[in-house]
Image (spheres, grey):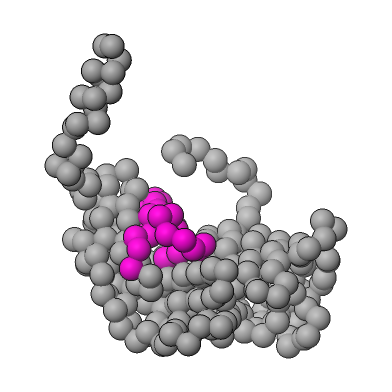
């Protein structure tokens, strides 16, 4: 009986009076590149471009675009948008979704990266944003390990990519291990990969091929130091996420 009384008291607590901690709003401030990939049972959409955070809970989107909507006729290009966000002191927060309107819940890391997803809606998505701060050709330099996702309606697959950039526009050969319907990976070695910088972003060009796992242009965005990269095709709904690898240890430590 005492347990019932206790639970009744807990359930009756005035939840509406609770306010999300917004003391970390300043963790998102300035111009960021972002990409959001959304897919449901009928549609696939990718949105990318610039998002400007005010540092006090509002944002604006400029130059963004919605790509591919499969069988839907209601998906049009997005040129400008605005919304709100709230970030707690710990870095955990939410951004009002620029496409679906549903909140994107995620975390702001120590290097300014925001990673999140729309957890309370009937869709699958990934949203990533990182600060824009004078990225140049030399920012993309060193060896990188990348995860690649292509949630296509026909044959969805993912892959692991290994690449090394010389910091001056050449990547050379990219090693690929792709996983689709089979548990046995498809391995490829894609040569002749190059990149250049446009508006603080990297345009990586893979040779056009009907058999290669990754083909054509991929836009990559990065943290200011180039240690974290993400992006995807400007005309498709894939997603690439990667980190620069080093030889001085894993660097794991602290809260995750």
Residue 59: quarter of image = bottom left
Residue 42: quarter of image = bottom right
Q: With 186 as the anchor, is 88 left or right in this view?
A: left
Q: With 7 as the anchor, is 37 left or right in this view?
A: right
Bounds of the magenta segment: 101-129
Task: Kindly give the residue lying farthest to the front in the view shown.
Answer: 1
Answer whether residue 214 is magenta in the image: no
Instruction: Please name whichever residue, 171 or 79, is drawn nearer the observer in this view of the structure.
Output: 79
* Image quadrant occupied by the N terminus: top left
Q: At which x and y percent is residue 197?
A: 52, 82
Q: At which x and y percent is residue 43?
A: 54, 75
Q: Evaluate whether residue 134 shows in this view.
A: no
Residue pictured at 19% horizontal, 31% vertical:
12
Answer whether residue 113 is magenta in the image: yes
In the rendered image of this protein, does residue 19 appear above or below residue 170? above
Residue 129: quarter of image = bottom left
Q: With 221 as the anchor, is 207 left or right in this view?
A: right
Q: With 101 as the anchor, is 13 left or right in this view?
A: left
Residue pictured at 26% horizontal, 75% vertical:
82
Instruction: Please name whichever residue, 182 or 146, is drawn nearer the observer in this view of the structure.
Output: 182
- Please tell me how many numbered marks the rendered image carries: 0
């Amino acid at each position: 009986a005492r347990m019932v009384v206790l639970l009744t008291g807990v359930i009756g607590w005035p939840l509406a009076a609770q306010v999300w901690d917004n003391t970390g709003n300043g963790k998102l401030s300035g111009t960021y590149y972002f990409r959001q990939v959304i897919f449901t049972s009928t549609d696939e959409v990718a949105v990318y471009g610039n998002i400007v955070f005010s540092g006090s809970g509002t944002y604006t989107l400029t130059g963004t675009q919605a790509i591919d909507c499969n069988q839907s006729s209601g998906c049009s290009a997005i040129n400008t948008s605005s919304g709100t966000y709230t970030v707690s002191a710990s870095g955990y927060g939410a951004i009002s979704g620029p496409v679906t309107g549903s909140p994107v819940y995620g975390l702001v890391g120590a290097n300014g990266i925001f990673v999140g997803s729309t957890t309370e809606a009937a869709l699958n998505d990934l949203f990533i944003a990182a600060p824009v701060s004078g990225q140049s050709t030399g920012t993309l330099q060193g060896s990188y390990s990348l995860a690649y996702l292509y949630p296509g309606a026909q044959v969805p697959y993912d892959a692991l990519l290994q690449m090394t950039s010389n910091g001056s526009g050449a990547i050379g050969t990219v090693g690929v291990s792709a996983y689709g319907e089979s548990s046995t990976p498809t391995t490829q070695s894609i040569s002749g990969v190059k990149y250049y910088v446009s508006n603080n972003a990297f345009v990586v060009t893979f040779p056009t091929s009907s058999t290669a796992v990754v083909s054509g242009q991929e836009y990559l965005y990065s943290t200011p130091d180039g240690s974290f990269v993400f992006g995807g095709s400007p005309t498709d709904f894939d997603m690439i996420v990667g980190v620069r690898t080093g030889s001085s240890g894993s660097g794991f430590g602290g809260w995750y």
